[in-house]
Image (cartoon, coloured by chain):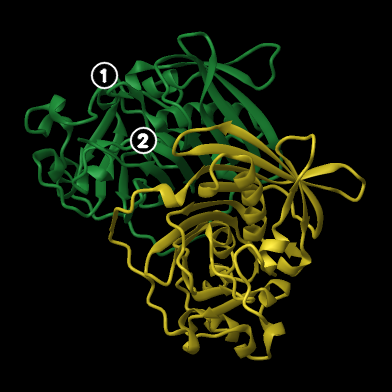
Chain colours: A yellow, B green
Amino acid sequence: MAQASIGDSEFDRDTAVTARSGESGVYDAELSAGWTIIRAVNGGYLLALAGRALGDALPHRDPLTITAHYLTASRPGPAVIRTEIVRTGRTVSTGQASLTQLAEDGTEVERLRVIAGYGDLDALPDDVRTSAKPPAIPPYEHCLGPQHAPGGESAIPGSTEIAGRLDLRLDPATAGWAIGEPSGHGEMRAWFGLADGRDADPLSLLLAVDALPPTAFDLGLNGWVPTVELTVHVRCRPAPGPLRISITTRNLAGGFLEEDAEVWDSEDRLVAQSRQLARALLGA
Amino acid sequence: MAQASIGDSEFDRDTAVTARSGESGVYDAELSAGWTIIRAVNGGYLLALAGRALGDALPHRDPLTITAHYLTASRPGPAVIRTEIVRTGRTVSTGQASLTQLAEDGTEVERLRVIAGYGDLDALPDDVRTSAKPPAIPPYEHCLGPQHAPGGESAIPGSTEIAGRLDLRLDPATAGWAIGEPSGHGEMRAWFGLADGRDADPLSLLLAVDALPPTAFDLGLNGWVPTVELTVHVRCRPAPGPLRISITTRNLAGGFLEEDAEVWDSEDRLVAQSRQLARALLGA
């Protein structure tokens, strides 16, 4: 496959939004079946799509902090994104978005509600003080892709259409669940890229934070872990090259768990932090 | 002072909201001057106020995950909170709120925009799997209140009206900034209570996560650290007794920093997790 670029890639085509003429701030989109897990559309993909609409509607283009509440399960097919400019500011502008689809009976159903602060990452001062360290993860070639799974790709739960869009390599230390030996620590670590070679940008970071297998697998839990709410902070524009992602869950309680993700770029910078609250709907 | 109780305390009176008759989902409130730092109204107090309105408007009463975007600086005085029910569900209901005040010229200005998922903490299963550990913090009597500051209470930056509402005792290891010796680690740890003895509930947790001095002080930074966005996950109903709060900042970059807070109850349970994105407007 030829190397894709930012603006010309599977991810860009599948997150394209079209402004409706005559309806300010309203966008049409098509949810691609290429980013599904079993039948569900990936939550990070949906967030990137809403994030692209907000970047068009707001005077600033980069998400600095963006929160989505997942209301009902999205399906591949047409969607409408309605944006609202909440406040425009010099450094941060705030916007809101609602993504809806038509149900089978023709009624409009809201899939996710998003609120976000946008800015211009390139205009920020380049001071950095950090005590954060990149995750300890083996080299890419020692990490495991779906083709390394016992029984092949189809044996990995959740590894369906989206797997073909991603170049994901799991740290073997957090992949034991695939052979029935979860570590119990609630961790996932991986190298992350897009399969067509497109480099990361702030929008694709919104996908990246929700693209690894659920940490619940590493806790030894099976079943569905639907996201209730996901907040992503984009801290700087990622450099070209592969990303490293570390996700941890420390606390499962009352049927809910948090997933904290960190994304590091090829220059060892912490480019995104995210946290989601998810439900643990445990399998039978 | 007589021991206050949940429902009858300074915090409850100052976060009271009054539903407007004939305007469904609209609430009047009075922002109290008692929860200010210098002239700014505390962001956690504002979140608790919006959170109380949402708990009234939604079919569920407890915030599970709540996000606020702070748009303009609130002032003590009248405010209006308009709520919207986004979705009602069996376990989680989603709502949105907008808090506005009138500017001096009479125009309505939005102060914060909130989106939240509410549920019933008492109805959740009591399964817990956690690797999270309470912060190592000395006993309450070895920690420092404003009265222990060199130069007295008035010497502590930010320690104005709100200090009288709180029973806050800082871990000496994270209080060095008050004598010009910040640790540089970006940490704050404290015992937290309300001054009138009211026990914690989910709403007061929304205050607690934003009530400590900014971690920027422990990084050796002075100046204002306004919150852009704050998300709080309430993970269980807190037991009676004092709370322990740990706040850490790992990454300051591009003039923004994150503050991660954890709140622990007297039964060693992690009752809330929060993260905020704040701007570091450094002093001259």
Q: Nearer the viewer, residue A25 or B217?
A: A25
The quarter of the image holding the C terminus of chain B is top left
The quarter of the image holding the N terminus of chain B is top left
Residue A188 visible within the image: no
User: Does residue B238 appear to the left or right of A109 in the view shown?
Assistant: left
Q: Position of residue B114 (x, y in %)?
A: 55, 34
The residue lying furthest to the right in this view is A105
Q: Is residue B67 above or below residue A133?
A: above
What residue do we see at 22% from left, 36% from top?
B283
The residue lying furthest to the left in this view is B151
Residue A14 visible within the image: yes
Q: Chain of mark 1?
A: B
Q: Chain of mark 2?
A: B
Q: CA distance from mark 2 to mark 1?
A: 33 Å
Q: Nearer the viewer, residue B140 or B163?
A: B163
Amino acid carrying mark 2 in the image: Pro
- What residue would you read off at disc 2? B226
What residue do we see at 25% from left, 51% from top?
B186
- Which disc is residue B1 wearing? 1
Callout 1 secondary element: loop
Label 1 neighbourhood size at 10 Å, few (<14), some (14-19), many (20+)? few
Amino acid carrying mark 1 in the image: Met
Q: Position of residue A2 (x, y in %)?
A: 66, 80
Task: Single out the mark in the foreground, 2 or 1.
Answer: 2
Label 2 neighbourhood size at 10 Å, few (<14), some (14-19), many (20+)? some
